[in-house]
Image (cartoon, grey):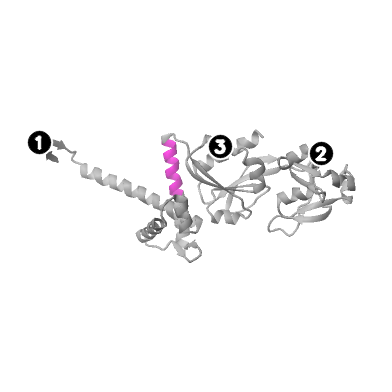
Amino acid sequence: MNIYLKNITFKFPNNWLLFGINIRKSRTMMDRIDAMRVFTRVLERQSFTEAAEDLNIARSTVTDVVKKLEERIGVVLLERTTRRVSPTIDGEAFYQRCLSIIQEVEDAETAFSGAKPKGALRVDVHGTLARHFLISKLPHFLSKYPDIELYMSEGDRLSDAIREGIDCVIRVGNIKTEDLVSKQIALLDEVTVASPEYLSSFGTPTSVEDLSDHKMIGYRATGSSVSLPLEFVIDGKIQYFSPEVSIMVNAAETLVAAAREGLGIVQVPSYHIKRDLESGALTAILESIPPAPSPVSILYPRKRKYSTRVRVFIEWLEAAFLTS
């Protein structure tokens, strides 16, 4: 086909119409992927308004995108109330498919362009681990991957992390769940400590037998009805002891604060009380029979293939623990 304009002839290939159609198809496909991104963010945030704020677009645009998406595939994806947005059965299934497609596209773009991962990364971690270990090391990660937008939340219930669309969860301890894949990335040394004031009043134990005359600060995890016992590695085996409990808590920061005030013996990761040991606020005891180290695991939804962003974060995290 030829087009004549001011005596200039433009020659187009015979398949130019097909070429144009392919461009439009490509644009349509990208529009659909963008719509999937909007839909997944609405579901994760359970709010059109919050999703719009995250994506930096108008709320009306978010509403329109989801409405057209539902019209195109012919099913209702979201149940809307005045307070929250929740997925229908079809919406939950479509959400999982969207996540897989989005991640495949992002991984392909990163792999072939050689670019560093970019985009939002949502991580849930215990506050103690975040404040006493991760925060000081994050500048290195963010300088290495400046286009990753890191959102770090502090949670306790794993089910909440899944529902809120968290990419990965970091937990200390032995975590078992059918909904999440767990990968151990480190072991944390634990230490048994008490305050100088407590030891002055009750004496310093030199063996586990002496613990019968002592008090411990009980730690009860969320969902548990009993406190965790003290544990010691003796002749290669873990043995458990439960002295009298002076006070029961369910937060790591409160546990250490109570120990500083002389309320009893506690066992905590050594990184958590490094400054207390250096300042003399707490004293290590029974060092010849330390507690078993605590595993650090990273968990992610079983049905969701983790993205390149999650992979590089896991690799960085493993290296951070190794060099600590």
Which numbered disc, 3 or 2, marks the residue closer to the eye?
Answer: 3
Identify the residue under disc 1. 7
Name the amino acid, label 1.
Answer: Asn
Which residue is disc 3 drawn over?
141
Q: Position of residue 243 (x, y in %)?
A: 84, 52
Magenta highlight: main SS: helix
The span picked out in magenta is: 100-112
Task: Tell me what residue is drawn at x 39 percent, y 50 percent.
Answer: 34
Relative to 278, is 319 on the left or the right?
left
Would you name the residue on which mark 2 appears? 287
Q: Give 192 or 200, whichever is nearer the viewer.
A: 200
Residue at the extreme left: 7
Give x and y (percent) for residue 283. 81, 41
Q: Residue at x 63, y 38 (%)?
A: 136
Ranked by sequence position, the earlier of labels 3 and 1 is 1
Q: Which quarter of the rendering shows the N terminus?
A: top left
Q: Report crowding for label 1: few under 14, some 14 to 19, many 20 or more residues within 10 A (C-alpha).
A: few
Residue 14 shown left or right of residue 308 in the figure? left
